[in-house]
Amino acid sequence: MILSIELVVGVSLLYIVLLFGVAYYADRKREEGKSIIANPYVYALSIAVYHTSWTFYGSVGKAATTGLDFLLVYLGPTLMAFTWWFLLRKIVRISKENNITSIADFISSRYGKSQWLGAVITIIAIFGVMPYIALQLKAVSSTFDIICGYPYIQLPLLHKNYPFSLHTNFFAALILSIFSMIFGARRQNSSERRHEGLVAAVAVESVVKLASFLAVGTFITYGIFGGFGDIFSRIDAQGDLLNHLTTLGDPGETTYARWLTTLYLSMGAIMLLPRQFHIMVIENSDENHIKKAMWLLPAYMFLINLFVVPIALGGILHTGGALGADFFVLSLPLQSGHSWLALLAFLGGFSASAGMVMVESVAISTMFVTYLLMPIVVRLTPRPWFPAMLINLKRLCIALVITLGFLYQTVVGETFMLVNMGLISFAAAAQFGPALVGGLYWRRANKVGALTGIILGFILWLYTLLLPSFIMSGRFSRAILDEGPFGIALLKPTELFGLAGFDLWSHSLFWSMLFNVGGYVALSILLPQGDKEREQVRKFVDVFTSDRNGVPWETKRMSKPVTIMQFVNLMSKFIGEKQANTAIAEYMGNREITAQGGVSEFELPKLKRFTEKTLAGSVGAAAAGAIVESYLSDLGSRMEPVYDIFSTVQASLAESREALYVRLKASELINRTLDLQIIMDDLLALILKEFKLDLAVIRLIDEKGVLRVRSYRGKGIAAIIGKDWDPESETYIGEAFTANRIQFVNDTQYITKPLSRDLMAREGIKSFAHIPIARKGEHPLGILSVFSKNIVGLFNEPFLDLLESLAGQLAQAVKIVTEMEAREREREEKERILLENARVLKEMEIAKQIQLSLLPSSPPVIQKIEIAGRCKPATHVGGDYYDFFLHGANNIDMVIADVSGHSVGAALIMAETRSVLRAQARSDKTAGAILATLNELLHDDLSAAELFITMFYVRYDTDRCVLAYANAGHNPPLIFREGQRACVELDAEGLILGVKRDVQFEEKIISLRQGDVVLLYTDGITEAQNPSGEFFGTGRLCDILTQSHSRPAEAIIETILAEVESFSATSVINDDISMVVFKVFPSRQLMSQNQSAAKPFGVQ
Amino acid sequence: MKLRVALFKRLRLRESWVIFFILGFVMMNYPFIQIFNKPYRVFSIPLLYLYFVGGWALSIAVIYLFTKAINQPEDEQDEGDHR
């Protein structure tokens, strides 16, 4: 029974439309951000792309002819699944972090992003996989022929080519090409590595594969036969066949060696075939999906193989032999009249072929573009149409790969080749194994080793496997096979170097692996790694510890700074402007951007790596590296190693030994002394000795706010060390100080401040740094500057960290020392003031004594009257003065004066006044005349000193009891008259001394009676204040005088003083106090002659 | 329960994975398969075939257990799964 072509084509097309729909839906969902393939089941199903039509049909064929070895193709992957959680997860992690696009990209990236290595792997992949694609196309056309019932159905199907099948082949190739091109290279301007639509379609196909195979298996086992037992016992009845098929080791059949070889090859194939790598690694959306896939995939393979043996044996039973066993899956349902089941099986086989061809062509074309075309593209100047060109190149490559497969199948199309092509492909892919796995775990593995190993392995594979396969299928003469090339038996492709007795596979695997691994290991050990390689080793081997790995800082720097915009421009040329802007925005996030719109020097290499990684997603790692590199060199910049200031290896996160040593040394010398100069000198000497610097300078800020050079070591450069900087000025030092941030220039060639540039160029300084001397979070106290004349790129992060910490320690020392000095100064100042005070005090004491001695030591003793005088200066010296002069036996002059103020100046004027007065008092002038003369004599001095004198002059004639007096602006004295109950004031007209040169002083006369008391006083008494601000006043004074008039003169003074003191509630008086009291002894003859001169005053 | 925790703890170790991997490799190769490479029948199914199919099913079960062990919450985990 057969099906009509229309029906088969129609159903197939419907199925393809369904796949298109699924793929389209998945891509749409993806764009909406709701991925339908991001789950472990889809992931596991997509990995089942491993199950191609080679095994879909071929497993049964194998089971029917050679026995159990068909199982190995699946047992190998199952065994491999044990390693996935470590091996596959590691590969996936690395690929995600580096935007890896294919297995060639992966291996090439590991070995320093080698363009060559990638190209070699691509070529091997094309060689190894092209026939495999051919096989798939062939399977589609053959099964199509079978199901449509072409007359050749009874013939061994794969043995010849037929004109019709060309058409089916062609259409199969065309449809698969279109499908792959649409979903394998979908977006015009995307750096997206993943193809969700493709994966979704592949997953659906895997379900169809499984379902159809199970359906056919169930039908044959339980429909045609009576179950497993039935089939086994029936075949048993046919003799030794079953034993033959289910045991190993018979001569000429599956040997143990071949068993091992097949197992090994399939273990490698599940990881290393380009399509497997693509679907497992590149299309993986979450590494946690691996967990489920680890058992789901083996379970899938277990299920799909469950019925292989029953189908094979059933087929043998049904058809009477193993002829055409490859298509039992299809032919048994057909022959038993279940054409729909056969159609289902056909769709399953078609799915197996289609999935493989699509994924393989996408994977290969990616490698093709990145490693065979990009090397050319990289040499071109980037243009805006590059993104479009790249995607179209990829489409072209997909078509090309499938076309090559189609041509191969048409041209070669031979039996042996095709049925064994799967395993031959496995053997080719196995050549990637050592370089890939070694690259993941072996640090020393290098590019030359990997390249050599892979090339040697490939050559051996060509020679010992591909060539014999061609020969065996009758393409070439068997002479080489039988006698060796040029008759050299040792070089026979199947018995190389005389190694006979092995099957073709084991022999080839042995030799290719021996040379592959041998070359890889030997050269990796013999030759060193390049710089770039070492960097990549860390990213691969230490991927799970990458956040905490090795050196946390950059070991490379960019010789000339490049701006963010320049990077964005570059990216947009390859991945489109929108994508570039999105990418950079995501990357920058909350990173610090400098005022100039750039990033810090230490951030630049990271930005460069990010650009490379982003580009790698669409052009591959090697090309991305080359593109960025050439772009940088166009801009005049390049990556150069940071000068390794610490020569010891920084093996861990900890600091290098040097840095620790310097830190320790520094704190030692800072704590050794308190002499700041010694500390600074020693510290600079230490820095200079340990690091390759030419000059180190310490500037500290002084009281005037200028950064003054305090210490320097090294080759003195006058222009630098001779300069004290104003921190506000537009210099690096100024900026370091005001912003309290390290300023450094790693290459003075690219300096931006003109002032500094000229200076550095003149002095030949290559790099320098200014480090603020500051404790954490405090204002800087100065600047530590270091200069190098030889080394560009001296200042890397760890070095600057170290310098900063040294500056911090120095700041601590400076702070301590300056605080100590300040305290010392303060103490000295206090001491000095105290001493000074004591000295002044002492002198003032002397002055006081002298001044007091200028006052009458005791009142003159004279008949009929009693006199007492007292002066109490407010400070040591004062301006009060009183004196007595005797004229003969009967006359006495009394004077009281107050020089304004009570300073030393007042005291001196008082002394002068006294001298002048003493001279004048000797004359017989009247009181008024004396004051006038005095005024005239003192006027100049008083004006110059800006002082005045008030004075009251009294002359008393004891005989006549007449008191003559004149006043120069002084407080009028009080007079208490015996018998009266109140005091009167004595007053006379007269101006204060020192105001005007010519002054007339009124002179008045009053006659006193016995018992009268006259009180001359200065304003210190009446103007004494109590705490509430009230003046003592004349009233109180008058009362005291009234009450105490009968007491002796001295006692009256004491009383007044005590009253004043108690009134002001303090012993400290504000003004000088002076008094003169004189009492007339009682005598009745004395009468007042001029009472009118005294006006009544005070309380009655 | 205690046994399960102890088992899972061991299964998280990388060593366990390597041991099972090597064990699988050994059990699938000469000379181990020599033991089963005999023309016997078990319930009329060839011994070697049964061995492989059974062993296959068993290893899938073991991997399943392994993945369950990885999924255990971190607090039960004191030796780390990826050392």
Image (tube, coloured by chain):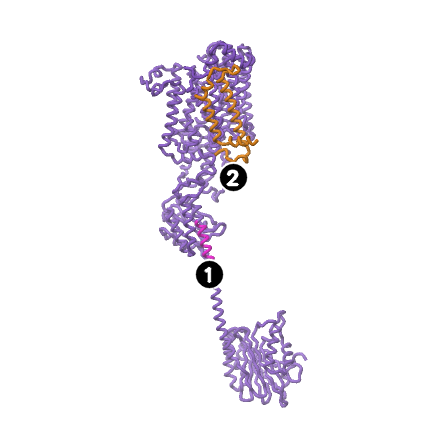
Chain colours: A purple, B orange
Q: Tell me the subunit letter for badge 1.
A: A
Q: Is residue A811 magenta?
A: yes
Q: Which residues are magenta?
A: A806-824
Mark 2 or mark 1, whichever is nearer to me:
1
Quarter-of-image position of residue A15: top right
Q: Tell me the subunit letter for badge 2.
A: A
The x and y percentages for residue A1030 are 63, 71
Residue nearer the viewer, A341 or A791: A341
Badge 1 element: helix
The x and y percentages for residue B69 are 53, 30
Comes first in the chain, label 2 or label 1? 2
Residue type at tag 1? Glu
The x and y percentages for residue A735 are 46, 49
Q: Above or below — where is A1028 with respect to A925? A: above
Q: Is residue A392 visible?
A: no
Q: Quadrant of the C terminus of chain A?
A: bottom right
| Dots 2 and 1 on the same chain | yes
Give the residue number, with chain letter if any, for mark 2. A589
- Count of marks placed on residues: 2
Residue nearer the viewer, B79 or A122: B79
Q: Residues within 10 Å of mark 1 (few under 14, many from 20)?
A: few
Q: Residue furthest right?
A: A1100
Give the residue number, with chain letter if any, for mark 1. A824
- Relative horizontal placement of residue A59, taking residue A1036 as reference (left or right): left
Badge 2 element: loop
Q: CA distance from mark 2 to mark 1?
A: 53 Å
